[in-house]
Amino acid sequence: MPEDALARAGTDGVERGGGHKQIARSRSRDAADGFGCGTNGDRTNQFGVAGKGKGKGKEKRKEDPEAPKEEPNFEASGLLALEDNSKNGVPLKFTRPPEARLPSVKWRLYIFTKQTEAPRILHAHRMPGYLFGKDRRVADVPTDHPTCSKQHAVLHYRLASTGEVKPYIMDLESTNGTFLNGKRLEPARYYEMMERDVLKFGMSSREFVLLHSGSANDQPIDPAQLQSPG
């Protein structure tokens, strides 16, 4: 090949080679970071898809207002109050009065039924209150008659203004009533009980007679004198 042709070929080869190398370097830089610089300051990739620059993203985050933090709530919730006034997971229909106390007198309940002549004795002085009802999950004194309510009545020993701790009975809005000495009580009201008072619940014939350890000077109890007539 003539020298001038070789010279031209060499020149073209260098220019073309140099041009190819420069293009390759440009593509390698673009491919290395994946983005080029757009006219509006945003960064674009090799496919022309615009991306957000680091600076602009920071400015947007600064402009967004921070979400307000929720303050802790230390008030007692309704659920907590319910748990405080429940027994074995069952909500109670009453709250214990603040003046409830353990009695100093050893009260007893003598329970009479038609099936037996001898009464069953319940020592009813070991707690500030006793719940009567047929729900055995919560009742302290079960009343299993069908006409009795699940939570029928409650007896509380309350500190009176005289300084004495006295027994009081309250009907818990039962369907068939609580009877004290044969008289039906108004619901949701406390009634003071006295020695030898007789309680009945609903249509049950079972009678609960309130006595204490010193009743009748500890003489044997005659059931006929304690049971109400009829």
Image (cartoon, helix red, strand yellow):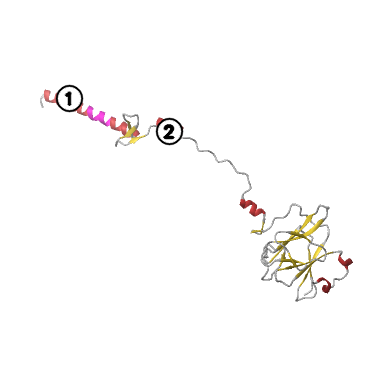
Residue 105, horizontal then vertical, whole percent = 83, 59
Based on the displayed image, in which of its 4 quarters is residue 22 positioned? top left
Categorize mark 1 by other alpha carbons within 10 Å: few (<14), some (14-19), many (20+). few
- Point out which mark residue 230 bears: none
- Sequence-wise, the earlier of marks 1 and 2 is 1
82 vs 136: above or below: above
**What's under tag 1, amino acid-wise?**
Thr
The magenta span reads: 18-25
Where is mark 1, residue-wise?
A: 11
Quadrant where the image shows the C terminus: bottom right
Magenta segment includes 24: yes
Quick one: SS at disc 1?
helix
What secondary structure do most residues of the magenta stretch adopt?
helix
Between residues 164 and 12, which one lies in front from this camera angle?
Answer: 164
For the point 61% across and 49% down, the residue is 77
How many numbered marks, from 0 up?
A: 2
The answer for how far apart the CA atoms under marks 1 and 2 are is 54 Å
Based on the displayed image, in which of its 4 quarters is residue 155 positioned? bottom right
- Point out which mark residue 60 bears: 2
Residue 28, horizontal then vertical, whole percent = 30, 32
